[in-house]
Image (cartoon, helix red, strand yellow):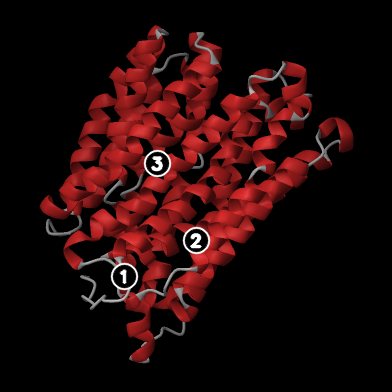
């Protein structure tokens, strides 16, 4: 469905999109911190009685539990976002995410309270997942629904760019604390990036409190067309759109989480590249990705969201084996180039147009619910298991080639899903 065009004389789309970018960057900083910590310290802090491989798999599993809560968060926040408005839900999700992140920084470890420590870690991670489940839909809709119809991929890409920005912040935070002596890092240093979220949350709340409500939601309210049961309406009227949106994300989520989470363990453990080198290369590639996402989105507005996403799936499939060839060489320059292949070019091509693409699949009355369910259920199936599956595949087959095949399969799923939408999408 094409979103009805609105007159927007009071609110500049760029201002709303930038505010969405800032808020999303802070929320994903919180979310990605867990991934870095799961790779670097959580196996020792919360699973010390397990052997290194099993401890790493357990840490990756705690990373993945958030994706179980994300669809529920998408449904709940989507329901009230479609009934009460996008802005209120964005503020609530930010408070919940920030509170969960600070709580992780205060958690006692296994040595202090035993098995209760990993249980509490999982519970707080579920809170994070619930919060981020409601974040993405609201952030992209605020940007897209304020934007002119011909530039909705571009403005919708700004909160998308908040994802690599959050990754840069979290990777930089852990790169900084890794400069501490090992005993200090493991005893208290790893907690600092989590506690720092208390400051960032205040910035995010200030930015989001100054936003105007979405004009498309205001139009629905004025026309008395607010859905009583958005999830029911989504599934009755747009089930095909949900399924397309869900599977369309495999080609962006699986490579991204392999690069941003699994490789942090794989590089030092199997290739012999230091964690500092991996983090630095990831930071550099993600910084470029922040700029690449809106640039690719300009092409999506010109040539079609669907077409750009399909081209991205083909590119990422072609880059899968070269990525691991470069990474497995162990040379710093090759590692950086590998990161550019996926964390910059691949991610920008498969992710930048996703917000505009998904938003146009659903009517405004239940759009928050529709995009959230498609995006978050897609994340549950693809993103959350990706580091765990990659680690298990490598342990079972003993080579990176099988992980490259895993990425190619993900891209094929995305390409086929996109075939079920009109070329003009």
Mark 3 in CB contact with mark 2 (< 8 angstroms): no
Secondary element under disc 3, as helix, strand or loop, is helix
The residue positioned 48% from the left and 68% from the top of the image is 210
The quadrant where residue 40 appears: top right
User: Looking at the image, is 236 positioned above or below residue 290?
Assistant: below
Quadrant assignment for the N terminus? bottom left
Q: Position of residue 316 (x, y in %)?
A: 27, 32
Q: Position of residue 99 (x, y in %)?
A: 68, 54
Q: Is residue 252 left or right of residue 64?
A: left
The residue positioned 70% from the left and 47% from the top of the image is 102
Q: Earlier in the sequence, mark 3 or mark 1?
A: 1
The residue positioned 19% from the left and 49% from the top of the image is 298
Q: Is residue 341 left or right of residue 26?
A: left
Q: Position of residue 280 (x, y in %)?
A: 47, 22
Mark 2 in CB contact with mark 1 (< 8 angstroms): no
Q: Mark 3 and mark 1: span between their CA atoms?
A: 23 Å
Can residue 216 be seen here? The reply is: yes
Q: Which residue is mark 1?
A: 238
Q: Mark 2 and mark 1: span between their CA atoms?
A: 33 Å
Q: Nearer the viewer, mark 3 or mark 2?
A: 2
Mark 3 in CB contact with mark 1 (< 8 angstroms): no
Q: Which residue is mark 3?
A: 253
Can residue 240 be seen here? The reply is: no
The circle on residue 207 is: 2
User: Looking at the image, is 138 positioned above or below residue 396?
Assistant: below
Q: Position of residue 193 (x, y in %)?
A: 64, 37
The residue positioned 58% from the left and 38% from the top of the image is 33
Q: Mark 3 and mark 2: span between their CA atoms?
A: 28 Å
């Amino acid at each position: 469905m094409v979103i009805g065009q609105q007159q927007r004389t009071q609110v500049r789309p760029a201002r709303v999109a930038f505010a969405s970018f800032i808020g999303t960057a802070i929320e994903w900083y919180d979310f990605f911190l867990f991934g870095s910590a799961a790779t670097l310290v959580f196996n020792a802090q919360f699973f010390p009685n397990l052997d290194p491989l099993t401890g790493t798999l357990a840490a990756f599993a705690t990373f993945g539990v958030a994706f179980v809560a994300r669809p529920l968060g998408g449904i709940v926040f989507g329901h009230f976002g479609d009934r009460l408005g996008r802005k209120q839900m964005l503020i609530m999700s930010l408070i919940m995410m920030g509170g969960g992140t600070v709580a992780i920084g205060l958690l006692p470890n296994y040595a202090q309270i035993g098995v209760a420590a990993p249980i509490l870690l999982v519970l707080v991670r579920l809170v994070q997942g619930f919060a981020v489940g409601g974040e993405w839909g609201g952030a992209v809709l605020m940007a897209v629904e304020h934007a002119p119809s011909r530039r909705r991929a571009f403005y919708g890409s700004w909160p998308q760019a908040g994802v690599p920005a959050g990754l840069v912040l979290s990777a930089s935070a852990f790169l900084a604390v890794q400069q501490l002596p090992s005993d200090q890092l493991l005893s208290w240093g790893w907690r600092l990036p989590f506690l720092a979220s208390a400051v960032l949350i205040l910035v995010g709340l200030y930015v989001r409190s100054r936003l105007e409500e979405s004009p498309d939601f205001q139009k629905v309210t004025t026309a008395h067309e607010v859905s009583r049961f958005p999830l029911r309406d989504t599934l009755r009227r747009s089930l095909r759109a949900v399924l397309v949106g869900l599977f369309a994300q495999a080609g962006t989520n699986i490579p991204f989480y392999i690069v941003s989470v699994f490789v942090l363990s794989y590089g030092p453990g199997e290739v012999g590249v230091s964690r500092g080198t991996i983090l630095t290369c990831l930071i550099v590639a993600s910084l470029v990705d922040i700029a690449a996402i809106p640039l690719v989105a300009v092409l999506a507005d010109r040539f079609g969201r669907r077409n750009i996403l399909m081209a991205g799936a083909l590119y990422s499939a072609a880059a899968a084996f070269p990525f691991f060839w470069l990474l497995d060489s162990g040379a710093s320059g090759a590692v950086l180039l590998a990161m550019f292949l996926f964390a910059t070019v691949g991610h920008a091509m498969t992710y930048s147009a996703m917000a505009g693409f998904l938003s146009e699949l659903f009517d405004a009355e239940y759009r928050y619910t529709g995009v959230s369910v498609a995006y978050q259920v897609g994340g549950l199936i693809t993103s959350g298991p990706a580091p765990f599956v990659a680690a298990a595949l490598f342990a079972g087959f003993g080579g990176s080639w099988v992980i490259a095949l895993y990425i190619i399969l993900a891209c094929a799923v995305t390409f086929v899903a996109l075939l079920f939408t009109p070329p003009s999408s």
